[in-house]
Amino acid sequence: MNGSAGADSGSLELAHARIGARWGSLPDEAQWRRIEVTRELGPMLDLARASGLAPWLAAITVDSGLHRIESALRQQWRERVRELAAWMPADWQASIRWCAHLVDLPAVQHWARGELLPAWAADDAVLRSLVDDRARQAAEPAWRDWLEVVHGQPSQILPAWRSACAE
């Protein structure tokens, strides 16, 4: 299950089964309680990694700073959405893939208002397109086109988002 579209993709039944399997691998109530009461990052990560949360935490270490943790979680979200999209019927895939950018909307809104983004944004592969013109030109075409519509027009974020999802 590498998330790439293939012969077994494109079925709601398959997607439902895979989503159910992922859901079943998440921590149960007792595991969540153990994680919640652990006050040090290292032991908490060890407990969480012993569950279905492991892929989400792969790039996070006890030495990771807040920005690195957030970046890793944004990247995992994007990857999980792309994986889910590959399981779905072909007509659904583009719209679902577009949802990978939901985690980027706060930064996009900030950027669309013409405000400078913090330096850490350049460390995120997607957010880099908001702070570096070359990265924006190299970004996926749908993302680049959407950014062109919303730049300087934060009120257009939602209408442009809806339009991009419908394509």
Image: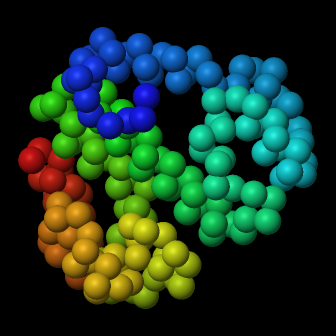
Q: Quadrant of residue 148?
A: bottom left
Q: Is residue 89 left or right of residue 105?
A: left
**Of 25 and 35, the residue lying toward us:** 25
Q: State the residue lying farthest toward the left.
A: 167
- In this rendering, would 64 be left or right of 122? right
Quarter of the image where one finds residue 153: bottom left
At 30% across and 12% down in the image, what residue appears? 13
For image coordinates 51% across by 49% down, the residue present is: 76
Q: At x 56% / y 53%, what residue is drawn? A: 73
Q: Is residue 167 visible?
A: yes
* Residue 71 located left or right of residue 40: left
- Coloring scheme used: rainbow
The answer to which of 134 and 111 lies nearer the viewer is 134
- Seen in the picture, residue 112 relative to 13 is either above or below; the reply is below
Please provide percent x and percent y for residue 72. 57, 57
Q: Considering only vertical position in the picture, is 69 above or below 9? A: below
Please identify the residue farthest to the front as the structure is shown: 7
| Number of dots carrying numbers | 0
With respect to residue 127, does 132 lie above or below?
below
Residue drawn 63% across and 69% down? 67
The quadrant in which the N terminus is found is top left
- 85 sits left or right of 94 in the view: right
Residue 156 spot, x, y in % from top left: 19, 67
Q: Provide residue 113's location: percent of width, then percent of height.
A: 32, 81
Where is residue 90? Give x, y as percent. Answer: 15, 31
Asked if residue 155 shows in the view, the reply is no
Q: Nearer the viewer, residue 132 or 157?
A: 132
